[in-house]
């Protein structure tokens, strides 16, 4: 005997809503199609499941018994679908990686390219998130791995050091600070800024840097996109703070210069975090090891040697 799952779902909705028309609307069907599903289910089982009256529908004793079984069946199907959804089309685990914008822009393109070259059937769901939120996503099981930067490892997850970067001051070539090799941010405090700061909000950034500043920065506008920020800096709207490796991709084209910042907070530590290792599938552990050990600089050096 084959029992139709859409018929079971319609029965559950009709009993819970006490109306076939409301159940049809809930399941995005016309009422006649909903009625046909119930009639076909009754035909398959050889029993009347619903009685219809002017106020709606009521389950028969057989309908009530099937209702409780149907709820369990539909929940089991939902769990089965969720289980399979964790795997990609090739049957390999779907690796959920949460990373902040800086890590994605600086490190992950070449790292993922090499990984997919070695594992063409692999699938990685990359989520861009703020650093402060990434450990929570991993801890709660919404991501398998996370890459974030912080002053120290986040609690509640297993974190290992990943990379270090440095943020610098981006200024136009004709700016008074353009001839300086490095400064402390305090020396630029009187100039207007094009914002989007380390820690992703001006208020959070100030909590990090305010001890070294005589007064808050003057922020004219905040722009998250790196290239758009550089365009605004070029037009004289303000100067900006950006990861130096990312800024290096734009400064020549936009007539800008990077001035190193000596402030301690300008050096950032990135971490890769997971839940307990024993909870991870072997392909996820393999991917984690690839991310930790892959060195883009060596790859670039090897490519340069072939040219």
Image (cartoon, rainbow, N blue to C red):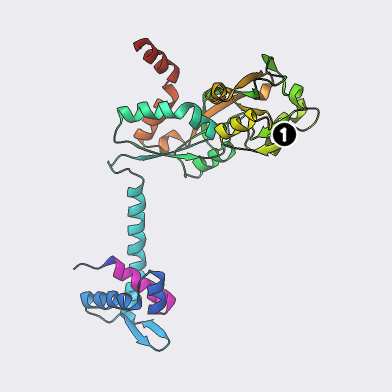
Which residue is located at x 59 percent, y 31 percent? 231
Secondary structure beneath dot 1 equals: helix
The quadrant in which residue 180 appears is top right
In-front residue for pair 126/229 = 229
Task: Magenta stretch: give its range.
Answer: 6-19
Say above or below: 4 vs 207.
below
Taking the image as shown, residue 163 lies to the left or right of residue 10, namely: right
- Locate residue 178, reporting x and y percent: 68, 18
Say whether residue 69 is visible: no
Taking the image as shown, residue 211 lies to the left or right of residue 68, namely: right
Q: Is residue 302 magenta?
A: no
**Residue behind mark 1:** 206
- Locate residue 116, reporting x and y percent: 33, 31
In-front residue for pair 100/215 = 215
- Locate residue 190, reporting x and y percent: 78, 27
The quadrant in which residue 27 appears is bottom left
In-front residue for pair 30/249 = 249
Which residue is located at x 70 percent, y 32 percent? 193
Say whether residue 137 is visible: yes
Which residue is located at x 23 percent, y 75 percent? 45
Say above or below: 164 vs 91.
above
- The kind of secondary structure the magenta stretch mainly shows is helix
Which residue is located at x 32 percent, y 58 percent? 77
The quadrant in which residue 11 appears is bottom left
Say above or below: 13 vs 81.
below
């Amino acid at each position: 005997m084959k029992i139709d799952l859409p018929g079971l779902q319609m029965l559950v909705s009709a009993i819970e809503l006490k109306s076939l028309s409301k159940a049809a609307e809930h399941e995005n069907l016309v009422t006649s199609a909903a009625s046909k599903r119930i009639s076909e289910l009754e035909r398959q089982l050889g029993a009347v499941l619903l009685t219809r009256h002017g106020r709606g529908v009521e389950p028969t004793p057989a309908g009530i018994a099937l209702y409780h079984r149907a709820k369990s069946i539909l929940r089991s199907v939902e769990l089965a679908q969720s289980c399979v959804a964790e795997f990609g089309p090739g049957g390999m685990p779907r690796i959920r990686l949460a990373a902040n914008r800086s890590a994605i822009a600086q490190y992950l393109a070449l790292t993922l390219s090499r990984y997919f070259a070695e594992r063409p059937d692999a699938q990685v769901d990359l989520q861009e998130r703020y650093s402060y939120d990434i450990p929570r996503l991993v801890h709660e099981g919404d991501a398998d791995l996370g890459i974030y930067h912080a002053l120290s490892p986040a609690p509640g997850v297993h974190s290992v050091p990943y990379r270090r970067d440095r943020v610098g001051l981006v200024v136009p070539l004709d700016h008074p600070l353009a001839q300086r090799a490095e400064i402390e941010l305090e020396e630029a405090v009187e100039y207007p800024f094009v914002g989007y700061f380390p820690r992703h909000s001006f208020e959070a950034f100030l909590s990090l840097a305010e001890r070294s500043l005589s007064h808050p920065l003057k922020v004219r506008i905040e722009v998250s996109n790196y290239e758009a920020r550089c365009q605004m800096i070029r037009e004289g709207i303000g100067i900006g703070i950006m990861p130096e490796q990312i800024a290096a991709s734009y400064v020549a084209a936009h007539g800008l210069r990077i001035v190193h910042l000596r402030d301690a907070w300008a050096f950032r530590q990135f971490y890769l975090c997971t839940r307990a290792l024993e909870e991870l599938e072997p392909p996820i552990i393999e991917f984690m090891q690839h991310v930790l050990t892959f060195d883009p600089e060596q790859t670039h050096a090897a490519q340069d040697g072939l040219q």
